[in-house]
Image: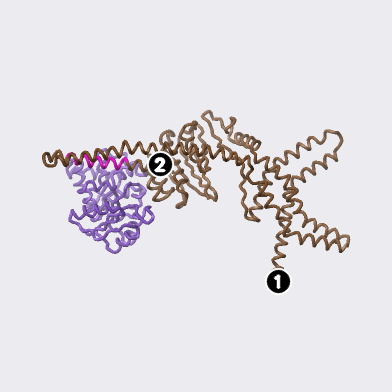
C-alpha cells in the first residue's frame, strides 16, 4: 500500500516536472517555429525571411541567459546539484576626476551607460554565452523530447476519449503514467554536462589564479622582508644596547654607583622603547584586537582611534576565515587612512554586513571626493589583495564627494 | 593587601608575584586560564587582582571577560587589567559600569615598580589607574571633544592626569605645582565641563571618566 502511494506520488511529481522541463526547453524552438510559420505565411517576396531571422536570433540571444538560469535553478531545486554559472564578472565602473565614467574599455557620460556598454561587450566575448546557446540547442532534444512524453500521452488519451476510442485512451494514460517518474530525469545530466564550466572558462580561470598567485607571493616576500628589517634595526639593536648598558652598569656598580644608576635608567627606557616598537610591528602584522575579538570589534577599536567622527554599523560577531578577516581589516584600515589623509571629511561611516554568500564592507565619508586609482596606488593594491579571495572593490568618488568604497568578498 | 595574579606566562607571573611580595603584599592565589581566573576572583574576593587579557584556553580576551564576569557578580571588585596593548574599546567596556576600582595598564607599567604598586593600591581603594595613551585618545575623540576645546593647556594636563586616576597631590608632584594650585585648576575645569566637584577623589575621577566615555 505504502509502495503504491509513493509510486503515485513520484508519478505526480514527475509529471509536473516533465511539463515544466518541456515548457522551458522548448521556448527557443517555439520562437524559431513561430518565425518559420510566419515566413511561410508571408512569403510574398524572397527576402521577407530576413527580418524574421534577425528577430528570432535576437530573441534567442536575449532568452539564453534567463533560460539557462531557470535550468540551473530547476536542477538545484530537484536534485540538489549546484552548478556555478561561470559568467565573466564585470570590472567595477569608476568615475574619473573628469566626471566621466570608465568601465575598463570605454568612457561614458553616466554610470548607467557605462554599465550597459560594459554588459554588452562582456556578453559578446564571454565564452559562457556561446556555451549557453549550444546548450539551448542540445536541451531542446535531449531534455525536451523525453520530457514531452508524459504530456503527449495525456494529449493522446484526451484525443482517444473525445473520439470514444477506448484503446487510444488507455494507451495514452499508460504511457503518461509509466513515463512520468523518469521523463524529466535527463535534465540533470544534460545540464551538468553542457552548462558546467567549459575548457575555455577553466583556462581563463587558471590564468587569473596564476597571476594572483604571483602577486601574492611577491607581496608576501616583501612583507616578510619588511618585518625582518624592522626587527633587525629596531628590537634586535635595542636589545644589544640594553645588554651593553647592563654590562657596563654591573662594572660601574662598585666604582661609580651614580653613573651605574643612570645606565640602569637608560636600560629601562630602552626596554620600554623596544616594547613600543614591537607593539607597533605586531599591530602591522596582525592587530591583537582582531585575534581577540574578530573583525567587527577590531574595526570598532580602529574607528575609536581616528581623529574624526566614525560610526560603525555591524551586527554581532562574524565567524570568518582568519585570512579574509585580516584582508578586510587591513582594507578598512587603508580606506579610513585615505579618508583622514585626503578626503577632508568630518564624518565617516563603516558598515559590515553578511548575506548568504558574501561579506560586504562599505566605507563612506562626507569629504571632497575625486579619489583616483592609479595602477600602482594603494587602492589598486587593495583590489589585488581582495582578488585573491575572489573579492571585489568598487569605488564611487565624484568630484565634490562623497566617496563610497565597497568591498565584497564571497564566503560560505 | 591580599592579591590574585592571573597571567599565563610563567616568567611574567613569577616576576609579578615576586615584585608584589617585595612590597609586603600577599599573593593569595594565581591563575593561568580564563575559567581559573573567574573562579579565583569569586572564591578569594581579593583586595585587588592583576589580570592579563589574553589567556588560554582560547588565547583571545579570556582574562578581560573573566574580569567583567566577576565584576558582574561582585560589583566594584577591584581589578587591574594588564595587557601588551591598550585599546579604547576595552577601556570603555571596563569603565561602563561606573563603579570604579578598575585599572587598565600596559605591561610596561611594571618597569616602574613604585608607580605600579601605587596603581594597585589606588585600584584597591576604589580608584582607577588608566593608561595615559588611552586617556589621551579618550580626550581627543568622542562626543566630549568640542567642549574640551575651552580648557586651557594646563587644565587639559590636569584633566588627563586626573583621568588616569591620580590624586591632586600626585598631579601636583607630576606637574611641579602646589596642591592648592591644582585644586584651583580642577575647580575651573569642572565648571567649564559642567561636572559637580567632589571632595572624594575616587568619585571625582569616575565623573571625569564617565564624561570622557560619553556616558
Q: Main secondary structure of the magenta part?
A: helix
Colour in which chain B is drawn: purple
Q: Residues within 10 Å of mark 2 (few under 14, many from 20)?
A: some
| A5 to the left or right of B66 | right
Q: Position of residue B115 (x, y in %)?
A: 21, 48
Q: Are marks 1 and 2 in contact (CB under 8 Å)?
A: no
Q: Position of residue A24 (x, y in %)?
A: 72, 49
Image quarter hosting the N terminus of chain A: bottom right
Front residue of B76 and A64: A64
Q: Can residue A271 be found in the magenta stretch?
A: yes
Colour in which chain A is drawn: brown
Chain letter behind tag 1: A
In which quarter of the view is residue A111 placed?
top right
For label 1, the residue is A1
Q: Residues within 10 Å of mark 1 (few under 14, many from 20)?
A: few
Front residue of A146 and B74: A146
Same chain for mark 1 and mark 2? The answer is yes
| A293 to the left or right of A29 | left
> Mark on residue A343?
none
Q: Can residue B116 be found in the magenta stretch?
A: no
| Residue A384 makes an appearance in the image | yes
Region in magenta: A262-277
Disc 1 secondary structure class: loop
Front residue of B123 and B199: B123
Chain letter behind tag 2: A
Amino acid at each position: 500500500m505504502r509502495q503504491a502511494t509513493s509510486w503515485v506520488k513520484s508519478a505526480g511529481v514527475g509529471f509536473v516536472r516533465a511539463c515544466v522541463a518541456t515548457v522551458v526547453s522548448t521556448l527557443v524552438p517555439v520562437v524559431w517555429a513561430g518565425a518559420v510559420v510566419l515566413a511561410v505565411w508571408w512569403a510574398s517576396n524572397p527576402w521577407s525571411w530576413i527580418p524574421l531571422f534577425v528577430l528570432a536570433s535576437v530573441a534567442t540571444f536575449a532568452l539564453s541567459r534567463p533560460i539557462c538560469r531557470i535550468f540551473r535553478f530547476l536542477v538545484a531545486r530537484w536534485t540538489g546539484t549546484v552548478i556555478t554559472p561561470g559568467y565573466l564578472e564585470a570590472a567595477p565602473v569608476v568615475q574619473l576626476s573628469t566626471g566621466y565614467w570608465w568601465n575598463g574599455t570605454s568612457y561614458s557620460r553616466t554610470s548607467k551607460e557605462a554599465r550597459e556598454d560594459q554588459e554588452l561587450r562582456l556578453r559578446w566575448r564571454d565564452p559562457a554565452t556561446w556555451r549557453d546557446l549550444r546548450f539551448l540547442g542540445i536541451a531542446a532534444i535531449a531534455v525536451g523530447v523525453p520530457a514531452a512524453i508524459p504530456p503527449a500521452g495525456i494529449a493522446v488519451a484526451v484525443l482517444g476519449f473525445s473520439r470514444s476510442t477506448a484503446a487510444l485512451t488507455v494507451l495514452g494514460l499508460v504511457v503518461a503514467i509509466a513515463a512520468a517518474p523518469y521523463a524529466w530525469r535527463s535534465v540533470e545530466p544534460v545540464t551538468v554536462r553542457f552548462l558546467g564550466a567549459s575548457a575555455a572558462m577553466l583556462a581563463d580561470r587558471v590564468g587569473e589564479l596564476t597571476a594572483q598567485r604571483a602577486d601574492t607571493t611577491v607581496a608576501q616576500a616583501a612583507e616578510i622582508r619588511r618585518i625582518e628589517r624592522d626587527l633587525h634595526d629596531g628590537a634586535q639593536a635595542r636589545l644589544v644596547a640594553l645588554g651593553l648598558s647592563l654590562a657596563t652598569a654591573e662594572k660601574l656598580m662598585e666604582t661609580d654607583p651614580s653613573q651605574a644608576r643612570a645606565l640602569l635608567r637608560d636600560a629601562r627606557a630602552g626596554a620600554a622603547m623596544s616594547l613600543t616598537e614591537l607593539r607597533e610591528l605586531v599591530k602591522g602584522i596582525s592587530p591583537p584586537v582582531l585575534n581577540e575579538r574578530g573583525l567587527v570589534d577590531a574595526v570598532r577599536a580602529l574607528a575609536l582611534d581616528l581623529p574624526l567622527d566614525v560610526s560603525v554599523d555591524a551586527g554581532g560577531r562574524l565567524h570568518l576565515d582568519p585570512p579574509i578577516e585580516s584582508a578586510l581589516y587591513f582594507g578598512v584600515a587603508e580606506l579610513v587612512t585615505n579618508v583622514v589623509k585626503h578626503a577632508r571629511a568630518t564624518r565617516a561611516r563603516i558598515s559590515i554586513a553578511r548575506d548568504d554568500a558574501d561579506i560586504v564592507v562599505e566605507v563612506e565619508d562626507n569629504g571632497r571626493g575625486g579619489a583616483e586609482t592609479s595602477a600602482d596606488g594603494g587602492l589598486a593594491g587593495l583590489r589585488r589583495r581582495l582578488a585573491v579571495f575572489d573579492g571585489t572593490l568598487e569605488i564611487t568618488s565624484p568630484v565634490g564627494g562623497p566617496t563610497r568604497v565597497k568591498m565584497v568578498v564571497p564566503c560560505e | 593587601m591580599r592579591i590574585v595574579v592571573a597571567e599565563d606566562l610563567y616568567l611574567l607571573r613569577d616576576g609579578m608575584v615576586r615584585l608584589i611580595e617585595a612590597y609586603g603584599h600577599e599573593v593569595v592565589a594565581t591563575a593561568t586560564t580564563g575559567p581559573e581566573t573567574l573562579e579565583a576572583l569569586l572564591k578569594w574576593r581579593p583586595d585587588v587582582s592583576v589580570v592579563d587579557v589574553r589567556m588560554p584556553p582560547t588565547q583571545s580576551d579570556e582574562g578581560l571577560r573573566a574580569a567583567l564576569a566577576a565584576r558582574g557578580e561582585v560589583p566594584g571588585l577591584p581589578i587591574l587589567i594588564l595587557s601588551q596593548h591598550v585599546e579604547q574599546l576595552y577601556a570603555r567596556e571596563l569603565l561602563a559600569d561606573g563603579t570604579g576600582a578598575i585599572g587598565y595598564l600596559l605591561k610596561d607599567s611594571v618597569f616602574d615598580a613604585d608607580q605600579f604598586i601605587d596603581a594597585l593600591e589606588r585600584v584597591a581603594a576604589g580608584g582607577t589607574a588608566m593608561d595615559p595613551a588611552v586617556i589621551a585618545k579618550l580626550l581627543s575623540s568622542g562626543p566630549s571633544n568640542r567642549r574640551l576645546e575651552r580648557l586651557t593647556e594646563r587644565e587639559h594636563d590636569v584633566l588627563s592626569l586626573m583621568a588616569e586616576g591620580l590624586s591632586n597631590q600626585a598631579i601636583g608632584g607630576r606637574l611641579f605645582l602646589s596642591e592648592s594650585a591644582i585644586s584651583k585648576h580642577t575647580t575651573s575645569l569642572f565648571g567649564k565641563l559642567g561636572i559637580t566637584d567632589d571632595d572624594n577623589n575616587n568619585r571625582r575621577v569616575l565623573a571625569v571618566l564617565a564624561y570622557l566615555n560619553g556616558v
